[in-house]
Amino acid sequence: MSMTREIGAGLDGLAQLRAFIAAGKRPGIGDALDFDLVEVDDGHAVFAGSPGPHAHNPMGVAHGGWFATLLDSACGCAVHSKLSPTQAYTTLELKVAFHKAATAATGRMRAEGRVIAFGRRVAYAEARLVDAAGVLHATATSTLLVMEK
């Protein structure tokens, strides 16, 4: 399923993301890892999710891949918010730094992404993963390729 074709065909990136939120739908990765796009603005995107047992590694803490997925999504959708109707993007590089573990007891977390620079072919974004108390759990920087569809 392509949500961009199903819900946001012909819209610019920001309008597409707003349409996704309004429709209450999420892609398969959001279902599998239990997280949602909850806020979007020009150059800014926020995902929220809870690191429940579905995201735990054998030690009982949230797997780094769960952190990285939320951070990649926040960086990517921050860039997506700046796309024209004829553009698409893909992540070229993602660097994640882990600062603090999370468990189911941590509760709902927010991955807050923002665009640092948006060029004709390349964009740069960063994101932070924080818990409800504002405690920082991870950060990421991302390089993304901007292309015509």
Image (spheres, grey):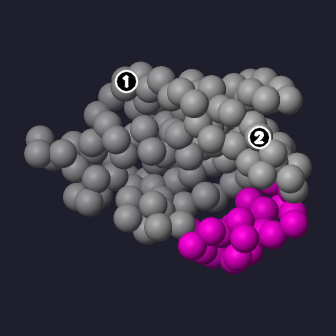
Residue tagged by mark 1? 99
Judged by depth in the image, the label closer to the viewer, 2 or 1, is 2
Q: Amino acid at mark 2?
A: Met
Residue 27: x and y in percent read 54, 66
* Nearest to N terminus: mark 2 or mark 1: 1
Q: Is residue 132 visible?
A: no
Eyeballing the image, is 47 above or below 72?
below
Eyeballing the image, is 93 above or below 76?
above
Q: Amino acid at mark 1?
A: His
Mark 2 to mark 1 CA distance (whole Å): 33 Å
Residue 119: x and y in percent read 83, 26
> Magenta span has 14?
yes
Q: Is residue 69 left or right of residue 123?
A: left
Residue tagged by mark 2? 147
Residue positioned 56% across, 68% down in the render: 26
Residue positioned 23% across, 58% down in the render: 53
Name the residue at the front extreme: 149
Picture quarter with the N terminus:
bottom right
- 10 Å crowding of disc 2: few (<14), some (14-19), many (20+): some
Label 1: which secondary element: loop
Magenta residues span: 1-26
Q: Quadrant of residue 29?
A: bottom left
Q: Which mark is residue 2?
A: none
Q: Quadrant of residue 49?
A: bottom left
